[in-house]
Image: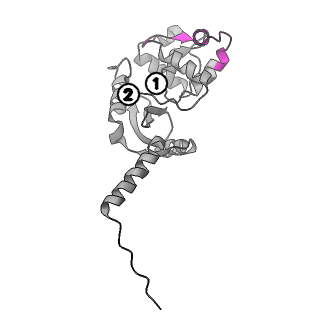
Amino acid sequence: MNAVPELPAPPESWRHQAHESLMKAFAPSRAYCAWVEAPFGPVFLARTQKGVCRVSFRKSEDELLSELESRSLLPEMAPQKLERERRELSEYFQGKRRRFDLPIDLRWGTKFQKSVLQAASRIPFGECCCYGDVAKRVGRPRAQRAVGSALGKNPVAIVIPCHRVVASSGVGGYTGGLDVKRTLMEIEGIDVEEVS
């Protein structure tokens, strides 16, 4: 029986090039994840090469990673790659930051949802407006419920301040829970009793 000749190993430079090519190909799908401590518990966040794509009130790292995988991303816990994002959120929770200077990746949602989130992002720190006001700003004055639904799907809570949008009859709802919404409003000096 003839022995199969052993093929020479590819040069190290080829392996390096192949690795670099793979990393480049998968870069748009990678999501680096971390968490930051908030007054109400951990807040999880994820960033793609375009910017922050998720700020979440999930209960665990595993829940966040599963959610991102279900959205066709390749998540990886990498707090060292989110130092800026973690720092800005920590400063906000401590009352030291009034606005975020972070790029945002709004890859999910309809054109209407994105217009609602852009309108919410323009509400100044420490101020509130009603769902109806946001509906008018996006050119759909009767779409208050649709505005509420779009805000409920905000993938980057806090950074896009949907907590500043309230119902005409009071605080209104919040995906993270009303206690979280009230805490965020208190951080910004918004009188929750006055809103209620």
What's the residue type where badge 2 is placed? Leu
Disc sitting over residue 89 in the figure: 2
Residue extending furthest bottom?
1
The location of residue 110, given as percent across then percent down, is: 61, 27
What's the residue type where badge 1 is placed? Ile
- Quadrant where the image shows the C terminus: top right
Residue at 41%, 51% in the rendered image: 21
Which of the 4 image quarters holds residue 2? Answer: bottom left
Question: Within the magenta stretch, is there residue 78?
Answer: no
Pointer 2 with pointer 1, Cβ within 8 A: yes
Q: Nearer the viewer, residue 157 or 117?
A: 117
Which of the 4 image quarters holds residue 151? Answer: top right
**Looking at the image, can residue 89 be seen?**
yes
- Of mark 2 and mark 1, the one earlier in the sequence is 2
The location of residue 96, given as percent across then percent down, is: 32, 20
Q: Is 80 above or below relative to 51?
A: below
At mark 2, the secondary structure is: helix
What residue did someone put label 1 on?
158
Residue at 46%, 47% in the rendered image: 26
Instruction: Give the spatial CA distance, label 2 vs label 1.
Output: 8 Å
Please provide the residue range marked out in magenta.
Answer: 123-146
Q: Is residue 144 left or right of residue 164?
A: right
Residue at 31%, 59% in the rendered image: 13
**Looking at the image, can residue 196 be seen?**
no
Residue at 65%, 9% in the rendered image: 141
Q: Nearer the viewer, residue 181 or 63?
A: 63
